Amino acid sequence: MIDGTEQPMNLQRMVLVPVMLIFFGLLNFTNAQENPNFDEVNIRILPVRDNIYMLVGLGGNITVQVGESGVLVVDTQFAPLSEKIKATINDLAQSTSRYIIINTHVHSDHTNGNEALAQWAQELTGTTTRIIAHENVLVRMTATPDESVPETQISPTAWPNAPYLTGFKGLHFNGEPIEILHQPEAHTDGDSMVFFRSSDVVSTGDIFTPGNYPVIDIARGGSVQGIIDALNRLLRITIVEDKQEGGTKVIPGHGRLCEEADVVEYRNMITIIRDRVQNLINRGMSLQEVKDARPTLDYDTEYGSDTGFWTTGMFVEAVYRSLSE
């Protein structure tokens, strides 16, 4: 059934040694080539609805809401792009009296610009910029860094200074009620979706990435079932306008601006692959045997890749280990 219902499992817990390889690969999570030339990156503006915009550059999509209260930014991409991002926000801003940053999760392609944007906003307003994220994002950022991995060296200025501890945080900004919804054990253990209720827009972070298979960061608490649960929750928010078209706008962590039908297709794909892998596990197949069975074959042309930071094989392995844990 395509309903995201968790399948029963009576499997022996497995040692997740290869997960660390995935962990270090995700520290540089980006949909661009290695060692990108940031000077060549342009920040593109896509009007979404009302006073909400989607900024596309390198790394995760940025959501910007502007109004009389100030500027709210969801995710901040990479620090070397901060000057371009600031210039773009300046072009959109109706008021610079207050700034709020929300991080949808901990990965550097969504948080690396926190410090530069927060300091810039503080200079403009004379007040400390609120950086909101789930408590688990703060826990991950403040963990003892690995000195051999520069991406783990995170300045305290970039840490969330207004973490929320429960499954929900609400605020009212620029005349609009905004819901920040925690999604446990999904892409990571600190994922948040940001729902702009009046505008009917949802910013999802990497729970939803329509151009590729979802990254499941098991080392940071992610799971395939948590991704499905999060997408089902997203579908309870989205409403179509007419004939499965229009309605709620969905800003994904990476990729094109979407609607409910795109989320349904993505949720169905992951659920079907989960069930296939679970069936192979129940038949006693090893990880390599599951990979050889190619449970993603009919979806690979749309979502798969044999190169880059997140390959089809890595996705299958993450699903396998998530179900076997």
Image (tube, grey):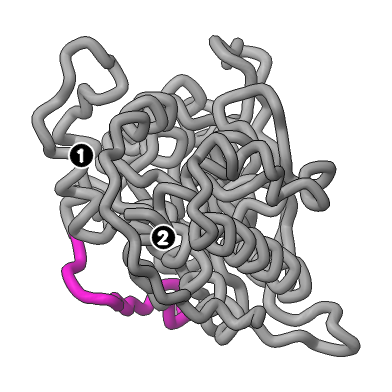
Q: Which residue lies furthest to the left in this view?
A: 144
Going by the image, does 273 lie left or right of 133?
right
Quadrant for the N terminus, please.
Answer: bottom right
> Which quadrant would residue 147 be assigned to in this image?
top left
- Of the numbered discs in the image, which one, if any, rests on residue 186? 2
- Of the numbered discs in the image, which one, if any, rests on residue 37? none
Kind of residue at badge 2: Ala
**Element under label 1?**
helix
Dot 2, crowdedness within 10 Å: few (<14), some or many (≥20)?
A: many
**Element under label 2?**
loop
Kind of residue at badge 1: Met
Q: Which residue is drawn at 52% across and 75% down?
A: 196
Going by the image, does 309 lie left or right of 171?
right
In terms of depth relative to the viewer, which is nearer, 124 or 50? 50
Region in magenta: 163-178
- Of the numbered discs in the image, which one, if any, rests on residue 141? 1
Measuring from the top left, give residue 269's x and y in whole percent. Answer: 70, 63
Q: Which residue lies furthest to the right in this view?
A: 243
In this view, 259 is above or below 281: below
Measuring from the top left, give residue 58's x and y in whole percent. Answer: 59, 30
Mark found first going from the N terminus, 1 or 2: 1
Dot 1, crowdedness within 10 Å: few (<14), some or many (≥20)?
A: many
Measuring from the top left, give residue 19's x and y in whole percent. Answer: 35, 34
Q: Which residue is drawn at 56% across and 42% down?
A: 315
In this view, 99 is above or below 238: above
Measuring from the top left, give residue 131's x and y in whole percent. Answer: 27, 52
In terms of depth relative to the viewer, which is nearer, 11 or 121? 11
